[in-house]
Amino acid sequence: MPDSATHCYIMGVNGWYIMGVNAWYIMGVNAWYIMGVNPWYIIACKLTMIDSIPHSWLFQRMAAVVHHGGAGTTAAGLRAGVPGIIVPFFADQPFWGARVAELGVGPKPIPRKSLTAEQLSRAIQVAVTNADMRQRAANLGAKIQSEDGVAEAVEIIGRLKM
């Protein structure tokens, strides 16, 4: 696992990546940035911009994950056992952001409309330095990893009376 103050991840969504770049600049840390498209330029040596990468590989190597709060991305972050910083855009994303905060495995979500680089950098700082939050995230990740979700789903479906 990388030093908690040096590696984080942020998912770029609809041009909002500049906000993340500014937050990384403020913090002076290394970051991996998933663009979802081919990156058209590289900004600074501490920022790695990539087209795509499996969350299951990347997240476990990060000190924190910044993302939109979709169910799949949230689940991948929780499974990795690292704190999540959620910037919800719509649909169920505010719910997952609130749930992550309620569980104590990430700071309160930052709604997209009120997001600033300063807010984001503060949230990242909390996520990578709060020992209790990091431990709760690690414990939850270990619990999720120990589950056999497929077997559990098969058992539940088998109990249904159709």
Image: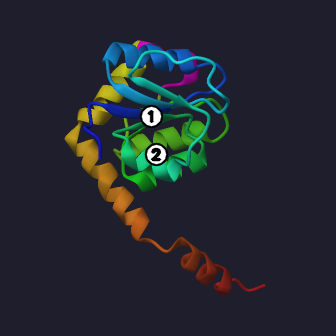
Look at the picture and state if 143 lies above or below 50.
below
Residue sitting nearer the eye, 3 or 41 = 41
Which residue is depicted at the point 62% across and 27% down? 13
What's drawn in magenta, residue-wise? 110-117
Which quadrant holds residue 94?
top right
Which residue is depicted at the point 33% across and 50% down? 137
Residue sitting nearer the eye, 97 or 62 = 62
Look at the picture and state if 30 lies above or below 134.
above
Look at mark 2 in the image and give the residue it sits on: 58
Asked whether, in this view, residue 23 is left or right of residue 2, the answer is right
Q: x and y percent of residue 58 in the render?
A: 46, 45
Q: Secondary structure at mark 1?
A: strand
Q: Secondary structure at mark 2?
A: helix
Look at mark 1 in the image and give the residue it sits on: 9
Look at the picture and state if 111 lies above or below 56.
above
Q: Are marks 2 and 1 in contact (CB under 8 Å)?
A: yes
Which residue is depicted at the point 42% across and 21% down? 120
Residue 115 colored magenta?
yes
| Type of amino acid under label 1 | Tyr
Look at the picture and state if 87 lies above or below 57.
above
Q: x and y percent of residue 44 in the render?
A: 43, 15
User: Which numbered disc, 2 or 1, marks the residue that appears first in the sequence?
Assistant: 1
| Residue 21 numbered tag | none
| Type of amino acid under label 2 | Leu
Residue sitting nearer the eye, 91 or 77 = 77
Quarter containing the C terminus: bottom right
